[in-house]
Image (spheres, rainbow, N blue to C red):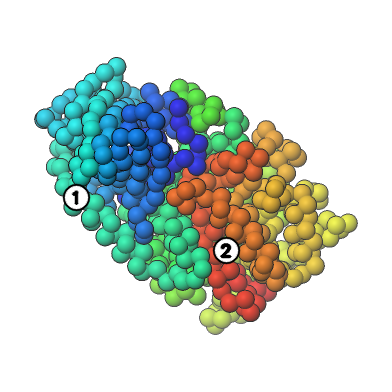
């Protein structure tokens, strides 16, 4: 039986990540990369689909935390007979990924059991398990291999590796599970104590570079650590989440693979890292973007693999029943090939913000900008699938048009400021003005005086909250204020913001999903920008309290069931938290939030 989404914590090594349940079971792990096939897939099925349990025998009280300033997880178990600490982490090594687990006796004595079920290829491939020496087991299937090293007694039973052991006060029992490509020699064992010290040193050193100060410092830092954990060190890419197919509604088909890098996150991520003082991460992200989009502008994708891969074909795994029976389980993401006009605005804005933040320019930035703008000038009038990647017919989404405006707005302002050819920046300004007028003509409900989801449509969309954030109109503009009011009326669910009205059928999917946390943080930003700081602070506090006991957020939240929904941990939620916190921690007398991109 897997836990709830909020029962999980994440550990990682900037190449992959594992989800550790409160129960002591690692139920999700993909190796060697975030988007590789899972060897532990119980999260989306049952224990027989792969997991690694280390837990006390019998009932116990459980508490956990991350060591301050690190991604080292400590789970404390208390029973009548004693107390013990389970420490989980992934070493920050340059070689192959590994998971280290150490059970330490704190008080009295305690009996533990362990069960290791390795199932490569998302829970279907049973490996050959063999004993290499007295303390080492190997598991091999096709190109994948794992080596388990521990002094604890283990035996094979029903195609599982099981064992029992005890710890007394001051005793420690270590476990190490290391991955390597099966055609290569098995990696040499690493010292557990040294690996733990090096990992702690890395994370504390990284946190020490932060410029975050103020009331929400610890909350923001935990979110920044989570964002760092979702980054892929070899390339600088950042995945949207560590998981696939955690449902946006329990029992529904709204299950997607989020182990890829989305262009829609570009500016949010860049601003979060820049404002926190992490220029190295911001520069790596900017460089990843420039490499990923290389090619003709009509081939640009909404998302890419961690190294910039483009082929992300979507398929399903019929042998996995899904989290809480939410099927199908999907691998890959067909939305990669959708037309989403907003990503052109994101790209233009990320290069603008990078320049303002003092980052070195990426190669051929000017050429990239001109080629992509010429293409956008031809296609911005077309309908698209929009930011939410609908699976229904294309529509004229207002947010998409606004972000197309952003692309030309940033271009003409930047080109003019740099002394570029007047004929070119005037051309871009003319197109920006044309898009602006088009949105005001077709994207506003004349009766209510508010923006709507699609041209000539009555429905609302939380993406409209981006209008003042990107500077399309000021937050105090009457039409923006009316839009916020209508969103409060029609999209709020117990104080949290839903993305859009799923009952309209706009997305071609069954009705219903949770409240979207990033959109809820955007409402915080709108309140602050409109001068309603106390209102924004109240909502921000509410959102922060939704994080689980170790400070992690999923994509969505169900206020009725009081449960997290969607993939986890979700970069979009954490980056939105960071940027809203920076807004709230800025001086109240500031007229512009520090994460607002431009004010017209």
Is residue 99 shown to the viewer in this render?
no
- Is label 1 in contact with label 2 (beta carbons under 8 Å)? no
Q: Residue at x 29, y 17 (%)?
A: 158
For marks 1 and 2, the one nearer the N-term is 1
| Residue 124 placement, left or right of 428 | left
- Which image quarter holds the N terminus? top left
1 or 2: mark nearer the eye = 1
Tag 1 residue: 193
What count of labels does the image hold?
A: 2
Height in image: 300 above or below 419? above
Q: Nearer the viewer, residue 521 or 300?
A: 521
| Residue 285 placement, left or right of 446 | left
Q: Nearer the viewer, residue 401 or 594?
A: 594
- The location of residue 200, given as percent across then percent down, is 28, 56
Tag 2 residue: 580
Q: Nearer the viewer, residue 124 or 552?
A: 552
Is residue 462 shown to the viewer in this render?
yes
- The location of residue 584, given as percent across then percent down, is 58, 68
Element type at marker 1? helix
| Quadrant in which residue 26 is drawn | top left
Looking at the image, which residue sits at the far top?
Answer: 158
Height in image: 5 above or below 273? above
> Badge 1, how many Cα within 10 Å: few under 14, some, many 20+?
few
Q: Residue at x 16, y 47 (%)?
A: 191
- Which image quarter holds the C terminus? bottom right
Height in image: 274 above or below 394? below
């Amino acid at each position: 039986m897997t836990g709830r989404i909020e029962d999980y914590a994440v550990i990682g090594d900037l190449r992959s990540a594992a989800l550790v349940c409160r129960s002591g079971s690692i139920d999700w792990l993909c190796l060697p990369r975030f988007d590789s096939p899972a060897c532990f897939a119980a999260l989306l099925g049952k224990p027989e689909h792969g997991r690694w349990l280390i837990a006390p025998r019998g009932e116990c009280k459980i508490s956990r935390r991350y060591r301050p300033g690190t991604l080292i997880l400590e789970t404390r178990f208390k029973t009548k007979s004693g107390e013990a600490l389970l420490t989980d982490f992934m070493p920050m090594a340059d070689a192959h990924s590994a998971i280290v687990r150490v059970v330490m006796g704190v008080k009295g004595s305690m009996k533990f059991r362990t069960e290791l079920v390795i199932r490569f290829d998302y829970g279907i491939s049973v490996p050959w398990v063999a004993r290499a020496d007295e303390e080492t087991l190997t598991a091999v299937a096709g190109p994948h291999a794992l080596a388990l090293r521990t002094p604890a007694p283990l035996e094979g039973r029903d195609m599982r590796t099981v064992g029992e052991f005890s710890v007394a006060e001051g005793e420690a029992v270590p476990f190490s599970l290391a991955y390597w490509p099966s055609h290569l020699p098995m990696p040499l064992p690493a010292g557990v104590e040294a690996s733990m010290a090096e990992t702690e040193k890395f994370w504390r050193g990284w946190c020490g570079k932060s410029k975050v100060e103020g009331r929400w410092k610890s909350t923001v830092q935990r979110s920044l650590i989570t964002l760092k954990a979702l980054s892929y060190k070899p390339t600088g890419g950042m995945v949207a989440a560590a998981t696939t197919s955690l449902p946006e509604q329990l029992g529904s088909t709204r299950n997607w693979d989020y182990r890829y890098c989305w262009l829609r996150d570009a500016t949010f991520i860049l601003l979060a890292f820049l404002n926190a003082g992490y220029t190295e991460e911001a520069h790596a992200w900017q460089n990843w973007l420039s490499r990923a989009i290389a090619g003709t502008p009509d081939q640009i994708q909404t998302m890419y693999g961690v190294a910039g891969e483009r082929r992300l074909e979507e398929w399903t795994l019929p042998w996995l029943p899904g989290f809480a029976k939410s099927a199908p389980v999907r691998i890959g993401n067909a939305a990669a090939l959708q037309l989403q006009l907003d990503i052109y605005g994101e790209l233009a804005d990320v290069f603008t913000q990078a320049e303002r933040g003092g980052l070195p320019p990426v190669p051929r930035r000017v050429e990239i900008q001109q080629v992509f703008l010429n293409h956008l000038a031809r296609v911005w009038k077309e309908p698209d699938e929009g930011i939410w990647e609908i699976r229904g017919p294309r529509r004229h989404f207002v947010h998409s048009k606004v972000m197309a405006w952003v692309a030309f707005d940033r271009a003409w302002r930047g080109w003019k400021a740099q002394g570029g050819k007047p004929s070119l920046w005037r051309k871009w300004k003319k197109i920006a003005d044309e898009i602006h007028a088009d949105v005001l003509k077709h994207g506003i409900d004349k009766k209510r005086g508010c923006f709507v989801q699609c041209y000539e449509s009555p429905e609302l969309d939380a993406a409209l909250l981006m209008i003042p954030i990107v500077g399309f109109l000021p937050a105090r503009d009457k039409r923006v204020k009316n839009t916020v009011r209508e969103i409060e009326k029609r999209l709020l669910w117990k104080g949290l913001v839903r993305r859009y009205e799923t009952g309209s059928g706009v997305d071609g999917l069954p009705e219903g999903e949770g409240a979207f946390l990033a959109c809820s943080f955007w409402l915080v930003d709108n309140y602050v920008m409109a001068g309603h700081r106390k209102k924004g602070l109240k909502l921000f506090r509410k959102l922060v309290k939704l994080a689980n006991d170790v400070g992690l957020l999923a994509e969505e939240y169900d206020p009725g069931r009081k449960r997290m929904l969607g993939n986890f941990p979700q970069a979009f939620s954490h980056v939105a938290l960071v940027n809203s916190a920076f807004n709230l921690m800025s001086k109240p007398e500031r007229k512009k939030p520090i994460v607002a991109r431009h004010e017209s």
